[in-house]
Image (cartoon, helix red, strand yellow):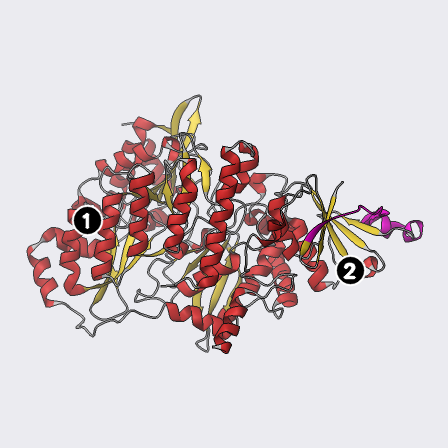
């Protein structure tokens, strides 16, 4: 599956380096048997409570979008970044469409498995501003307003 | 009113550009209808029985004369000369051509309007008590909170693909005017023991196939924590709401499966973890938004207008209109005017381009340039001097907008039904028209008092029949239109879900049925008792007997 990665605010095609994947359930059942795994696959109905001790050492966490309308993994991505403090790659897998990349990247997802990687760079910059805080470094509009007022 | 700054304007413009590109791809065939559907739905564009329908957002129901004139312009130039106000304070155009929609959105953007999040499984356009900043009984102006929610929910990255649509409503008084107990989240503004403004948070109400009255999960939420608390509710819902069955995907199903106490515990636990994460607005930004809603320059007036009292003494129709369609204002010498979009025999919520222009002109001259849309499909002129009421009344009358029936039997909520809607089983509009004609006498209507009839053309309940004092639900029975009557519902502070009265009625029988119920109520009521109160006092049985007794 072709892969795009977010790199310095740019979307670039990436070589799909072979990952050794293990599901969260299998990992928890028998970590020794999966000692060489590099990517943890988390289903979108999995609870992330107590996942801190599981994620250590994984280069990638793969989140699932079984259909583009199923948005559970947006919350999972934010929890991984903002609550658990995971700093490795978070990869979106499944029904990943151009029009969702803006939202996904704001939630902390930084790699995208896509059928069509001829994605316009615009996908990241559909909107110049955001109204809310999320998992990215973007200052929400209301903070920028405060800065404008302070500078004036 | 709120005014866009460069940030708001840029975001709306960028949304139009994005959609223009998507429409071009659809028209060229690069996108199939199937691929285009989710994209158009995020911009309020539906494909109905006969044509596309564009749903324009009117955030918290508030609009200026300039905005109303733009809606008239669009109705005239891109549609068939009319629009339709909905139960969510939005305006629908029923006949736009797909190729014109980006231009329509550009026109709307010129006056700080859009169709963002008026459909799709996202946080929909927020609705509000329509008397914000005007009502004598309000705790605080609900509109700044509506604007905060509008901004926070717009293109929310985490909550744009929820299990199902999500509706938030705010009311500013104990007199619930926004049906907050039948929304996904209802917010009731009130003050705590020490006079601080905050919200009662009600979750899990809703209509549709499984109607529920919502549960209070927090009795007092300080205003400054509004957005982080909403985010906690939405996160619990996004992660745990059902996605296997669209009819069980609303938050009401999750709340009732978990139980209200457990659901509240989940939300509170989530909120405890995020309340200090910088989601909530800074005090300066809350003040900035509130300043946009500062009161207009009211004059110092006597409580009563001598002139108006003289006019009402000689013009009985004006007198009735005053009694029925105006409401107490918080400022001495002013009144709130309701403009009925329920002309006798008319289509509930419909308004022509000329009528929109008339309302815009009147509002500009006599109501500080402000207009409100209501969830009961009417309009409001919020700030009219009592001395101006007669001229306002006469100008409304010249535009056929003077029907004195607010809250009365012919002030009917009806969904578009099978005349427009691709989901409907039956027509709703003709039933509303015939009931309205049957009770055409305004004097009789006033005598009957508050009586809310609500009609839905299918089980999705867009006409709110579950909360009608008399509800009418259209069902298809082997290709024939049948109507089921429910009794005793209410969408107000005393919210309740109506009970089915008995077997379905044919289209011919249903208007007679309403008349029988009303006749029985007149017989059974005690003085000053509303239909709903009589029903609650004596119960369903006598009403059912009256309804189904052999003629």
Give me the chain letter of mark 2: A
Residue under circle 1?
Answer: B402
Q: Secondary structure at mark 2?
A: loop
How far across and how far down the image is residue A11, in percent?
68, 52
**Front one among B344 and A146:** A146
Give me the chain letter of mark 1: B
Marks 2 and 1 sit apart, C-alpha to C-alpha, by 63 Å
Q: Secondary structure at mark 1?
A: loop
Indicate yes or no whether the magenta region holds residue A31: yes
How far across and how far down the image is residue B547, in percent?
32, 34
Residue B89 shows in this picture: no
Instruction: Relative to B373, say whether B543 is above or below.
Output: above
Q: Which residues are magenta?
A: A11-34
Picture quadrant where residue B274 is located: bottom right
Give the residue displayed 54% in from the left and 55% down from the top: A127
With B444 as the anchor, is A111 left or right in this view? right
Work out which quarter of the rendered image holds the N terminus of chain A and state it.
Answer: top right
Counting other residues with Cα less than 10 Å from the Cα at mark 1, is it few (<14), some (14-19), or many (20 or more)?
A: many
Residue under circle 2?
Answer: A50
Residue A53 shows in this picture: yes
Residue found at the very far left of the displayed protein: B314
Picture quadrant where residue B49 is located: top left
How far across and how far down the image is residue B25, in percent?
53, 37
How far across and how far down the image is residue B484, in percent?
40, 33
Give the residue displayed 27% in from the left and 32% down from the top: B512
Contact, mark 2 vs mark 1 (Cβ under 8 Å): no
Counting other residues with Cα less than 10 Å from the Cα at mark 2, is it few (<14), some (14-19), or many (20 or more)?
A: few
With B521 as the anchor, is B193 left or right in this view? right
**Front one among A58 and B128:** A58
């Amino acid at each position: 599956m072709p892969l795009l990665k977010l790199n310095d605010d740019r979307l670039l095609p990436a070589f799909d380096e072979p990952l050794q994947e293990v599901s969260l359930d299998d990992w928890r059942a028998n970590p020794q048997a999966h000692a060489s795994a590099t990517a943890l696959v988390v289903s979108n109905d999995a609870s992330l409570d107590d996942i801190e001790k599981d994620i250590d050492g994984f280069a990638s966490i793969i989140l699932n979008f079984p259909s583009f309308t199923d948005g559970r993994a947006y919350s999972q991505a934010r929890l991984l970044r903002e609550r658990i403090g995971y700093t490795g790659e978070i990869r979106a897998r499944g029904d990943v469409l151009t029009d969702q990349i803006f939202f996904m990247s704001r939630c902390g997802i930084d790699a995208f498995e896509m059928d069509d990687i001829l994605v316009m760079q615009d996908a990241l910059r559909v909107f110049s501003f955001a109204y809310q805080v999320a998992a990215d470094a973007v200052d929400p509009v209301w903070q920028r307003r405060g800065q404008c007022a302070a500078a004036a | 009113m709120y005014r866009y700054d460069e940030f708001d304007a840029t975001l709306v413009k960028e949304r139009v550009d994005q959609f223009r590109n998507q429409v071009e791809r659809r028209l060229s065939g690069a996108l199939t209808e199937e691929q285009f559907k989710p994209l158009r739905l995020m911009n309020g564009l539906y494909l109905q029985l006969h044509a596309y329908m564009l749903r324009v957002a009117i955030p918290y129901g508030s609009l200026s004369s300039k905005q109303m004139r733009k809606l008239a312009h669009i109705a005239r130039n891109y549609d068939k000369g009319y629009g339709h106000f909905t139960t969510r304070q939005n305006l629908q155009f029923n006949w736009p051509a797909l190729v014109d929609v980006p231009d329509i959105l550009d026109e709307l953007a010129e006056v700080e309007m859009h169709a963002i999040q008026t459909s799709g499984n996202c946080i929909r356009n927020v609705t509000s008590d329509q008397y914000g900043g005007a009502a004598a009984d309000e705790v605080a102006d609900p509109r700044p909170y509506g604007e905060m929610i509008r901004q926070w929910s717009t293109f929310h990255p985490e909550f744009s693909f929820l299990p199902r649509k999500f509706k938030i409503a705010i009311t500013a008084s104990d007199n619930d005017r926004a049906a907050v107990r039948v929304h996904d989240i209802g917010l009731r503004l009130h003050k705590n023991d020490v006079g601080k403004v905050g919200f009662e948070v009600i979750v899990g109400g809703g209509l549709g196939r499984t109607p529920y009255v919502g549960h209070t999960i927090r009795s007092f939420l300080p205003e400054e924590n509004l957005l982080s608390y909403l985010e906690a509710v939405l996160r619990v819902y996004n992660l745990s709401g059902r996605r296997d069955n669209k009819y069980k995907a609303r938050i009401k199903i999750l709340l009732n499966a978990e139980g209200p106490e457990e659901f509240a515990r989940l939300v509170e636990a989530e909120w405890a973890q995020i309340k200090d994460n910088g989601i909530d607005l800074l005090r300066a930004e809350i003040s900035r938004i509130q300043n946009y809603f500062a009161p207009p320059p009211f004059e110092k007036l006597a409580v009563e207008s001598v002139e108006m009292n003289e006019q009402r003494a000689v013009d009985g129709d004006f007198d009735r209109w005053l009694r029925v369609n105006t409401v107490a204002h918080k400022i001495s010498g002013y009144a709130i005017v309701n403009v009925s979009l329920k002309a006798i025999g008319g289509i509930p919520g419909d308004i022509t381009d000329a009528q929109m222009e008339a309302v815009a002109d009147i509002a500009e001259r006599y109501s500080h340039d402000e207009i409100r849309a209501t969830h009961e499909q009417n309009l409001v002129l919020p700030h009219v001097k009592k001395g101006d009421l007669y001229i306002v009344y006469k100008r409304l009358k010249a535009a056929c907008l003077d029907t004195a029936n607010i809250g009365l039997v012919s002030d009917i909520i009806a969904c578009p039904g099978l005349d427009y809607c691709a989901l409907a089983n039956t027509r709703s509009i003709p039933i509303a028209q015939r009931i309205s004609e049957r009770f055409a006498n305004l004097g009789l209507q006033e005598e009957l008092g508050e009586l809310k009839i609500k009609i839905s053309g299918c089980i999705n309940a867009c006409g709110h029949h579950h909360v009608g004092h008399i509800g009418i639900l259209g069902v298809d029975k082997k290709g024939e239109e049948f109507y089921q009557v429910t009794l005793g519902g209410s969408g107000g502070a005393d919210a309740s879900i109506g009970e089915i009265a008995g077997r379905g009625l044919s289209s011919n029988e249903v208007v007679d049925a309403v008349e029988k119920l009303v006749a029985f109520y007149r017989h059974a009521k005690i003085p000053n008792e509303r239909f709903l109160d009589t029903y609650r006092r004596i119960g369903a049985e006598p009403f059912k007997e009256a309804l189904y007794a052999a003629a």
